[in-house]
Image: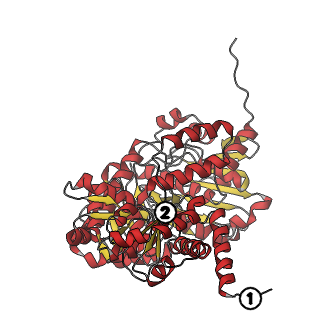
């Protein structure tokens, strides 16, 4: 046998009023929303009727209640039952005409937000020539409907909502608070809203609301200062007709964290929906803060966020394309301004360039990159050097930049965020672009080999040097290269670095994974780091003439440690021990004598 769910009305009211909304302050918005909808409905048949919403805080009513009066269409007794006392039944709302496109409210549960701040809600309403109806709702789920007594009857159609404040909610009914909330949510509404004698509506939005309208830039800049607290770098007009959306994107003047989403200010049919809408722009456009008004985007049930659907997805893509178009126009018509923008927000542009060819071309032509021959754009680098040779890591660039420059090798520092990926993507856009990742072996092929007789004479020294570093898995070689001031260079190829990581991981792994790593190590090509001594360096030449094996070992160990430090290489425990022992050993030899 089928049974009917048992519903605790007190629990439902508590759930919707206390857990659906993020803050009690939304009650002002919901009251204004209902009033504007009622006025919109009445104006459909009476275009000349006054459009006025009056809010009277307790200081003005004198009886401790808050009242909201509107000149709207009002409700019949049947409509009161359907709209004010039925939760979740949208079909009746459709039949009565209160879910049409032009209305702000779509859910019929906005009045419940008032139970965040009130224990009792009274609605006095009159529709056309119908009698005035009094609806009284309580936070425990009870309600009563009756014909309004003589003293409360309305002479004209419209509605008055009265809230009896909760004992702990008095701060939300202060005149200043109510005025601020009415101005926050309803400043752009197309009706007049008064809190006492203060008009809180300000008229039309400051951005163009129709195609061909000129933008009032001074007004937009004032809006940004007032509501965002910034002087924007630029203002980008936005328009998405399918979403009924107009507005602007304020380009922020200072760097922002790409992972921290500031959110956007969104109005729905000129009522503020939220100051922190997420997902309105693509993730890469974190440097822009939007202020928009839309008529077709759907809000969530709490009306505090946008509903994620196909229209919002299409709108996000369209707005992203318009911000992207602004960047392209800036590159074409105002390169100096673009350079200023890139200095502040290059991360966002580079993130977009990872999957957008036009933005990649923009980065290629305009973004200055660090190289060992000065600061150049990638386009300038190609023009001067042909091949884009790049170091994929910042430490790798620091290690090799000066030495590469001395060997006439121009190298781009691609160690910053996205730079390596962007360089590697360039050939997919322009097949004429040649790129090559810098390998330490590229440098050794540029170093000058020694005269055979000199190399033959140095074999005993090399044998002693190799014995000193053999336990560290390092190969010692001697070449002649610039700069002369550099005595030694520690070079690690990618395969050698992989082997080092494999060994370090193997030492920490358990027996099972150790066997797997051993198999990988066996298949890895044998390749060891190299300590390349510079025969042009006077100190190195003096070291090669030493005939004391112990002193040769100490000197080579010291050169090895210096090369590690100058190259910003990671220092292993064995390296640290060697640095310590070679320093103390050389100090001991330099200070002879008895203890």
Label 1 vs label 2, nearer the camera: 1
Residue 201, placed above or below residue 512: below
Q: Say which quadrant the N terminus sits in.
A: top right
Crowd band around label 2 with a 10 angstrom C-alpha radius: few (<14), some (14–19), many (20+): some
Q: In the rendered image, which quarter is residue 218 located in?
A: bottom left
Residue 439 appears in view = no
Residue 299 appearing in the image: yes
Q: Foreground: 306 or 437?
A: 437
Where does the image place residue 379, in percent across and percent down from the top left?
24, 68
Residue receiving disc 1: 593
Image spot of residue 211 (x, y percent): 25, 61
* Residue under the image location 44 percent in, 52 percent down: 40
Q: Position of residue 152 (x, y in %)?
A: 65, 54
Q: Considering the numbered disc 2 on the image, is that residue within a helix, a strand or a loop?
A: loop
Q: Residue furthest top?
A: 1
Tell me what residue is drawn at x 47 percent, y 74 percent.
488
Instruction: Give the mark nearer the N terminus: 1 vs 2.
Output: 2
Image location (x, y in percent) of residue 106: 50, 44
Quadrant position of the C terminus in the picture: bottom right
Drawn side of residue 184 relative to residue 456, left or right: right
């Amino acid at each position: 046998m089928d049974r009917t769910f048992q519903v605790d009305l007190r629990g439902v009211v508590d759930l919707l009023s206390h857990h659906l909304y993020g803050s009690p302050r939304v009650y002002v918005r919901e009251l204004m929303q209902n009033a504007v909808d009622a006025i919109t409905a009445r104006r459909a048949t009476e275009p000349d009727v006054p459009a006025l919403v009056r809010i009277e805080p307790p200081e003005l009513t004198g009886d401790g209640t808050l009242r909201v009066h509107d000149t709207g269409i009002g409700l019949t007794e049947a409509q009161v039952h359907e709209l004010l006392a039925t939760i979740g039944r949208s079909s009746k709302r459709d039949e009565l005409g209160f879910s049409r496109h032009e209305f702000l409210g779509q859910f019929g549960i906005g009045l419940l937000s008032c139970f965040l701040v009130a224990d009792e809600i009274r609605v006095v309403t009159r529709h056309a020539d119908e009698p005035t109806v009094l609806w009284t709702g309580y936070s425990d789920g009870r309600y009563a409907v009756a014909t309004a007594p003589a003293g409360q009857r309305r002479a004209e159609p419209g509605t008055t909502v009265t809230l009896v404040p909760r004992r702990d909610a008095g701060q939300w009914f202060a005149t200043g608070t109510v005025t601020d909330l009415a101005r926050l949510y309803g400043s752009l509404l197309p009706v007049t809203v008064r809190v006492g004698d203060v008009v809180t509506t300000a008229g039309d939005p400051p951005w163009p609301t129709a195609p061909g309208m000129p933008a009032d830039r001074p007004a937009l800049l004032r809006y940004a200062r007032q509501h965002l607290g910034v002087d924007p770098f630029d203002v980008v007009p936005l328009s998405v007709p399918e979403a009924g959306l107009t507005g602007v994107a304020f380009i922020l003047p200072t760097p922002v964290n790409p992972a921290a989403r500031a959110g956007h200010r969104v109005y729905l049919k000129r009522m503020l929906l939220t100051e922190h809408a997420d997902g309105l722009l693509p993730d890469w456009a974190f440097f822009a803060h939007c202020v928009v008004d839309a008529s077709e985007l759907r809000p969530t049930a709490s009306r505090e966020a946008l509903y994620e659907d196909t229209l919002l997805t299409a709108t996000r893509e369209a707005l992203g394309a318009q911000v992207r178009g602004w960047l392209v126009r800036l590159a074409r018509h105002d390169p100096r301004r673009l350079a200023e923008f890139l200095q502040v927000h290059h991360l966002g542009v580079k993130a977009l360039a990872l999957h957008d060819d036009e933005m990649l071309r923009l980065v290629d032509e305009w973004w200055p990159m660090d190289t060992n021959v000065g600061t150049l754009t990638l386009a300038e680098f190609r023009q001067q050097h042909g091949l884009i040779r790049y170091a994929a890591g910042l430490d790798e660039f620091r290690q090799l930049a000066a030495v590469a420059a001395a060997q006439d090798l121009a190298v781009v520092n691609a160690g910053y965020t996205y730079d390596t990926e962007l360089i590697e993507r360039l050939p997919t856009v322009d097949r004429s672009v040649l790129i090559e990742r810098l390998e330490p072996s590229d440098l050794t092929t540029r170093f000058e080999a020694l005269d055979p007789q000199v190399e033959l004479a140095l074999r005993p020294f090399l044998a002693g040097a190799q014995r000193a570093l053999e336990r560290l898995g390092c190969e010692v070689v001697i070449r002649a290269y610039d700069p002369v001031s550099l005595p030694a260079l520690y070079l690690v190829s990618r395969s050698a670095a992989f082997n080092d990581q494999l060994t370090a991981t193997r030492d920490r792994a358990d027996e099972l994974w150790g066997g797997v790593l051993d198999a990988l190590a066996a298949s890895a090509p044998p390749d060891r780091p190299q300590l390349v001594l510079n025969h042009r360096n006077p100190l190195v030449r003096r070291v090669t003439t030493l005939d004391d094996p112990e002193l040769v070992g100490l000197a080579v160990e010291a050169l090895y440690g210096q090369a590690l430090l100058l190259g910003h290489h990671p220092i292993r425990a064995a390296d640290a021990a060697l640095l310590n022992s070679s320093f103390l050993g050389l100090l001991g030899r330099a200070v002879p004598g008895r203890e």
